[in-house]
Amino acid sequence: MQSVAILAGGDARRFGGRDKGALVVDGRTILERQISELSTVTPDVRVIRRGDDLVPGCGPLGGLHAALNAARGDALFLVACDMPFVTAALAAYLLTLAGDADAVVPRTERGYHPLCAVYGRACLPAVERRLTMLDLLHDLRVREVTADDLGRFGNCDRLLANVNTPAEYASLEALQGHKK
């Protein structure tokens, strides 16, 4: 079995503390969009909030730790709640690549995207040793997924778009017209 976890417990400091998953894109909240889309991949979809962290104060890594501990599957697709355009097809594809890798992580010219990636249960010891998501990748056998590979699922900037500031939220309108 495979699992999905949506991280929804961040401080959103750059967004004035607002709940980014509650932002409306195309008439639905980002979180509603994600749950609807990703529940077609697996019935094991969890929303991980700050109170779910087993080790508070560790940011997204604490969310990953909680998600891996709660997941029913051996492979977990992890996504941040501020990524409105992530598709089930992308999640399913990344999950198929898990194989012998500890993590499957998209990498574009902007760098790694560890909050739209697959992590296996074997990651737990490394997660418990690390403090940040990018540091974690140094401890894992990572299979990178290039922008070219991601291109078959749509425009990489759209697929991996996230909302950290009000300006980024406003720029989503431009991305909504570019589905591929």
Image: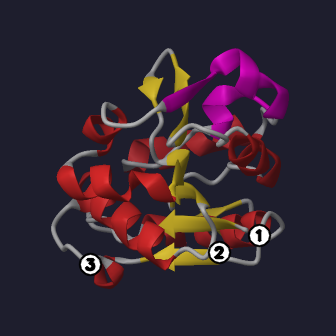
Mark 3 residue element:
loop
Q: CA distance from mark 1 to mark 3?
A: 24 Å
Q: CA distance from mark 2 to mark 1?
A: 7 Å
How many residues crowd mark 3 within 10 Å: few (<14), some (14–19), many (20+)? some
Using the image, determine if residue 147 lies above or below residue 171: above
Residue 42 is labelled as: 1
Disc 3 residue type? Leu
Q: CA distance from mark 3 to mark 2?
A: 18 Å
Answer with left or right where residue 48 lies relative to residue 145.
left
* First reached walking from the N terminus: tag 1 or tag 3: 1
Residue nearer the viewer, 115 or 135 = 135
Residue at image position (72%, 27%) is: 150
Mark 1 residue element:
loop
Q: Which residue is mark 3?
A: 54
Residue 15 in view of the camera? no
Q: Which residues are magenta?
A: 142-159
Classified by dominant secondary structure, the portion drawn in magenta counts as helix
Residue at image position (84%, 67%) is: 40
> Circles 2 and 1: CB distance less than 8 Å?
yes
